[in-house]
Image: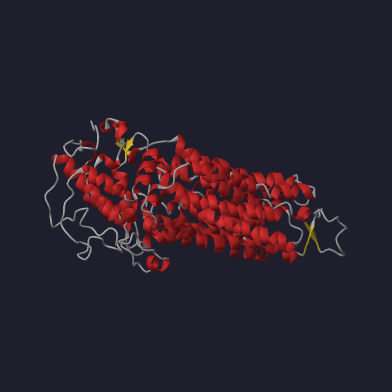
Amino acid sequence: MMSGLGSSHNKVSTSAFNYKRGPPLSRVFAVDVHDVDSDKFQDSQNAGFSWYILMTTLLVSLSAVNIGWSIGITNFSKSVICKLHPTGPMEAQSANEFPDRIPFSESAWSVAIGILSVGGLIGALISGAIADRIGRRNALVINNGFFLAGSVLMGTSTTALHFSLGRFVMGVGCGVASGVATIYVGEIAPIRWRGFYGTFFQLALVLGILIAQLVAMYVTTGLQWRVVVALPGVLSVVQVALLPLHVESPIYLIKARHVNEARHALLKLRRGFDVSTEWQESLASLDSGEADTYSSSAVVRESPVQSEPQLANAAQNDSNVTIKYIAAQAQQLVKISASGCAPNPDASSPTVSSLAAPEARFIPPISIWHIVCGRTRDDLRHLVACSSVLMALQQMAGIATILFGGNEMANSVFYPEFPLSAPWACIIICLTALPAIFICILWVDKLGRRPLLLGSLGGMTICSILAAIGMIFNIGALIIAGVFVCYFMFNFGLGTIPWFFVSESVPAYALGATTVLGCSLNWVLAIILGLLVPIIGEQIQGCLFIVIGCICMIGFIFVMICVPETMDRSVTRIVAKHAGPLHTVIKFRTRAAKKM
């Protein structure tokens, strides 16, 4: 029983959290004083499903719905929104009216569609800095300003430039959300359920695309399309109203020196569990090693802390706390609680008061260049390469299948006999993603990331080749089967896992820069493929599926050789095992098998 923290003679049971990589931590960071018997609590790394985290994840996923809506809404609205190649001036409108259709040229309409990805790239580039500066939750709340502004600009647009500006602003919001949302969910989710909660981002994105396409099919008037393009603003208002009611990421709060708030946030996220080990893991993942508070210049005197109240008060002084300062507090609390008295001074281990906390910087910024060159405390080049390649594969295989595969299948199979069926065929392709994502939600934390990625890429390789054969020999059934199953397999693994792979494989001190790198690469490829795939597809037609199949095959080999398994593993464990330049993960498994 832990009756309180006020006396230095109250002993705390530490048998429940002996951790092989370090000494046990005090219950001061594990449970509240009023939570009574701490021995009843299990390790939070074994925490299971939480309705609170699910509701938080669903609120965060509203940003992904806005991304999908922005992507899908223009697919079938072209003839309703724009007036192509106007031969004369617009019909007369009163001063208070908006035109039913906006005059566009073909090139201007293409720019309006593609500028969303340009805005997404800019948003992705600033997402890491925003998340590290104001917090993950606050960044998502403020980012809704881009969605609201973009919705208003598009809904009230009267010219092509006005509409394109709205699309650009909306794209910036999409880029910021794609980076920050995945970081936030990855940091609040328990280790054993990171895949479950992380998959909701892709589910929400696909739902946004699907619903937008369904709605766009029935838009016929100027008032209707203006309301439809402005709907993301409604979801933004909901998120602004409800998301602040949920906790901020504990890792960000520690990084921002709000230690007591971080403790309470972690306790709320892991209600009923002992968070001692998870707290230690959070400290380790934030320590970049760039500012060593244990250096000789930081030690000013050897004066041990005499009582637990003094340590508890020191923990409240957020402005003077560094990561190693917090760790020293925890270690001394263990000594005091276990022995019943204050420890003797020990020159080999600095005490809390011996650390120059006010002068020590918290965590210096980590740039992408430092990560790529391996100039961080942990050499993250292998893990960053894996996450970046997965994001690139997601875009190269997925967007090519949707942009070219869906349209070519519709044109080859349904036109000109069944022209009304072609739009529905594209919608059904998106529908096939839903069961695939639900399967991923159920199995990603049971089978692991590698099996799902390998199954996804292997299935896409086979289906792409089948679709290519169908296109070359004009076999409609083979085209339909190839495209449908290919998109199903894409969402089964490759479409979902890269979004949360970064947050569960890279330590928190480098997470912002790594996320910027991966998301920016994703948006850059979206711009390039959006321009090239339609042009190349018209030239080589069915052979493009062969190219997609080759990309998937290369991805399969890369995942099999290089991508590590992250299921049920802490970030510090993954980093310790896979630090260094790009290497094969098969060797690690072989050596382990030999030792056994």
Residue visible at 36% across and 51% down?
254
Residue visible at 21% across and 48% down?
331
Q: Is residue 547 left or right of residue 353?
A: right
- The one of 23 and 268 positioned closer to us in this rendering: 268
Q: Is residue 557 visible?
A: no
Picture coordinates of residue 108 (x, y %)? 73, 65
Hey, which quadrant is residue 256 in on the image?
bottom left
Q: Is residue 404 left or right of residue 37?
A: right
Give the vertical position of 86 relative to 325 (above or below): below
> Quarter of the image containing the N terminus?
top left
Residue visible at 28% across and 51% down?
326
Q: Is residue 200 visible?
A: yes
Give the vertical position of 568 relative to 528 (above or below): above
Give the vertical position of 283 relative to 293 (above or below): above
- The one of 261 and 377 positioned closer to us in this rendering: 261
- The one of 113 and 389 positioned closer to us in this rendering: 113
Picture coordinates of residue 284 (x, y %)? 30, 53
- The one of 540 and 305 positioned closer to us in this rendering: 305
Picture coordinates of residue 336 (x, y %)? 17, 43
